[in-house]
């Protein structure tokens, strides 16, 4: 972990030095904030969802990022740091269970799951490394987001189960006996979910510039808001710009660690003590694979830093 953080700090330091250098050469530099939201989905490998056992459902998520963007002619480069948080849903179809209780040797209890669902929560910090182009009205970015240090990773299971019993000495199944915990019951359980510390995501973004003044090409609308000196030359003054875009992030690496506990989907510690387990810990699913995906809308506001006016520099001459 320390090595990863050291590498990340070195990358940011190198980026910062590059920013100072290119700013001195007169290219456009922006610092900004983006906020995003959309639908989330988990793509599960065959070991995690065999024969329709697990059916992923659409979830939702969002996040925000602080970034630096470099623009040279039409070319743009972006880096910084952002955070995403998503809630994903899965519908499960576990098999029915039959349990023998030692206190009743002739009786067998049956458990039929009428519904079984799971919510996966996780947040991740990431460093974007994106390249693209800006053409006045439209722009695009493509590259990778290096996800590090996942946080608040947990899973919540919920089920509705029907319980009845069969006894060799009784002709009909026994149902609705509250003294024997028979009937329909709602169960739930929350567990922490361990994820890999590094998740590399492919990223794509395309959108429109809500103002064009100060960007490449012709101005749109009322243009940008300028800040700085009273000089009439706008190129030497800072300005605010706004963008609206659609984006898609897809996890290229497996989010699940290689080593995980191996438990059955349901654990019985007596008739009235039933514990639900996460699908990620289900015993036959060793080596399971999970990839995340987030697609949505992003709003960006960025400040174009004023260019360095070389004519105002005082240089020492020999």
Image: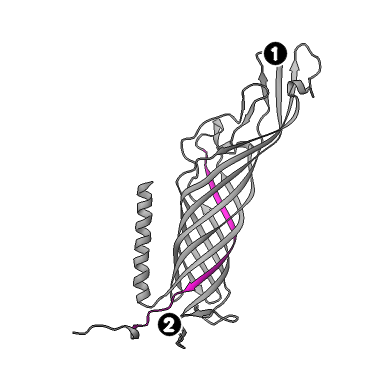
Q: Which residue is drawn at the image coordinates 71% and 23% (left, top)? A: 110
Can the viewer see residue 16 in this picture?
Answer: yes
Helix, strand or loop at disc 1? loop
**For residue 300: magenta?**
yes
What range of the chain is rendered magenta?
Answer: 288-310
Residue 236 got which mark? 2
Q: Residue at x 56, y 52 (%)?
A: 85
Q: Is residue 47 above or below residue 202?
A: above
Q: Is residue 235 magenta?
A: no
Image location of residue 196, percent across then percent down? 46, 44
| Residue 139 percent across, percent down from the top left | 53, 70
Vertical relation: 244 (above or below) 181: below
Q: Number of callouts in the render?
A: 2
Tag on residue 117?
none
From where the camera sits, is residue 129 visible?
no
**Which residue lies most toward the right here?**
172
Q: Which residue is mark 1?
A: 104
Q: Is residue 2 above or below residue 51?
A: below
The x, y position of residue 131, in whole percent, is 45, 65
Quarter of the view holding residue 294: bottom right
Q: Nearer the viewer, residue 226 or 278?
A: 226
| Residue 21 % position (x, y) | 34, 72
Q: Main secondary structure of the magenta part?
A: strand
**Marked residue nearer the N-terminal end (1 or 2):** 1
For the C terminus, the quadrant is: bottom left
Disc 1 versus disc 2: distance between alpha carbons? 87 Å
- Residue at screen point 60% across, 31% down: 265
């Amino acid at each position: 972990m320390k090595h990863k953080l050291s590498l990340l700090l070195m990358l940011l330091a190198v980026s910062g030095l590059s920013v100072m250098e290119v700013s001195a050469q007169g290219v456009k530099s922006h610092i900004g904030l983006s906020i995003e939201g959309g639908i989330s989905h988990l793509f599960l490998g065959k070991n995690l969802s065999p024969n329709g056992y697990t059916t992923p459902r659409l979830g939702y998520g969002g996040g925000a990022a602080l970034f630096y963007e470099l623009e040279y002619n039409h070319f743009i480069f972006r880096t910084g740091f952002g955070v995403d948080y998503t809630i994903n849903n899965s519908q499960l179809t576990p098999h029915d269970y039959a349990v023998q209780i030692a206190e009743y040797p002739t009786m067998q209890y049956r458990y039929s799951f009428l519904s079984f669902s799971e919510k996966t929560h996780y947040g991740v910090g990431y460093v974007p490394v994106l390249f693209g182009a800006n053409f006045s009205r439209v722009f695009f970015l493509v590259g990778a987001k290096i996800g590090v240090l996942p946080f608040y990773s947990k899973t919540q299971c919920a089920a509705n189960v029907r319980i009845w019993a069969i006894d060799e000495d009784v002709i009909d199944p026994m149902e609705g006996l509250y003294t024997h915990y028979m009937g329909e019951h709602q169960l739930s359980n929350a567990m922490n979910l361990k994820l890999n510390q590094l998740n590399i995501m492919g990223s794509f973004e395309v959108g429109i510039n809500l103002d064009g003044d100060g960007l490449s090409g012709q101005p749109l609308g009322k243009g940008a808001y300028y800040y700085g000196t009273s000089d009439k030359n706008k190129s030497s003054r800072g300005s605010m710009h706004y963008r609206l875009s659609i984006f898609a992030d897809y996890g290229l690496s497996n989010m699940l660690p290689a080593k995980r506990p191996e438990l059955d989907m349901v654990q019985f510690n007596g008739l009235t003590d039933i514990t639900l387990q996460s699908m990620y810990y289900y015993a036959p699913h060793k080596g399971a694979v999970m990839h995340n995906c987030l697609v949505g809308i992003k709003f960006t506001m960025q400040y174009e830093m004023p260019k360095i006016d070389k004519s105002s520099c005082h240089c020492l001459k020999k």
